[in-house]
Image (spheres, grey):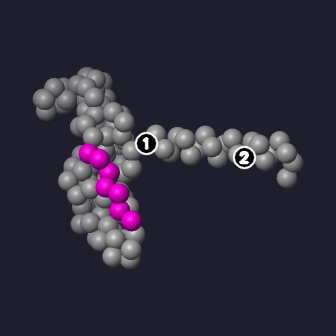
Amino acid sequence: MTRSARVTLTVVAAVSCGAQAQQAPNPCGPSSFNQKACQTAVKRNGYCSGGAWVTQQYQQYPYYYDLYRAYSAAGGAVSPAAAERCGRGGHGWFGGFGAHGRAHASAGA
């Protein structure tokens, strides 16, 4: 591998890691499981990360609880994700966009 290819790969890996570090962990992930936040995420098809809505398709809640139990029983370290609220401006708890999202956000406030 040439020197320039190694530098490019290193830069790409560093940028990728930085982008992942900015997003809050999924509250339904086994290593970041947060019961209340996961139940909310499943119900609302997403979760808030750094004030922005992350749309996520979920299965039924018991699936994630079972994954978490198996993971922790096997000795996996669990660091629960913090529950966040998205800021106003259309990307609130409901994950809507534009006028539709604002209407839902103001109805929930």
Task: Say which quadrant the C terminus sits in.
Answer: top left
Left or right relative to 50: residue 105: left
Label 2 sits on residue: 9
- Percent x, y of residue 16: 58, 44
**Label 1: which secondary element:** loop
State the predominant SS element of the stretch in magenta. loop
- Percent from the top left, x then y, of residue 37? 24, 50
Residue 100: where, in percent of width, then height?
A: 24, 27
Depth check, front residue: 80 or 103:
80
Task: Give yes or no for residue 50 being in the magenta stretch.
Answer: no
Q: Residue, x 33% and y 33% (percent of image)? A: 51
Would you place residue 71 above or below residue 55 in this image?
A: below
Residue drawn at (64%, 46%) of the image: 13
Quadrant in the rendering for residue 62: bottom left
Task: Determine the residue positioned at 55% across, 41% down.
Answer: 18
Percent x, y of residue 85: 25, 37
Q: Indicate which disc residue 23 carries.
A: 1
The question of residue 82 being in magenta is answered with: yes
> Can residue 56 be seen in this snapshot?
yes
Q: Earlier in the sequence, mark 1 or mark 2?
A: 2
Q: Is residue 28 visible?
A: no
Question: Toward which corner of the image does residue 68 lie, by quadrant?
Answer: bottom left
Gap in angstroms between the C-alphas marked 1 and 2: 22 Å
The magenta span reads: 77-83
Q: Residue at x 36, y 48 (%)?
A: 56
* Vertical side of 9 occupied by 66: above or below: below
Q: Amino acid at mark 1?
A: Gln
- Is 35 above or below relative to 108? below
- The kind of secondary structure element at disc 2 is helix
Q: Residues within 10 Å of mark 1 (few under 14, many from 20)?
A: some
Q: Amino acid at mark 2?
A: Leu
Q: Residue furthest bottom?
A: 74
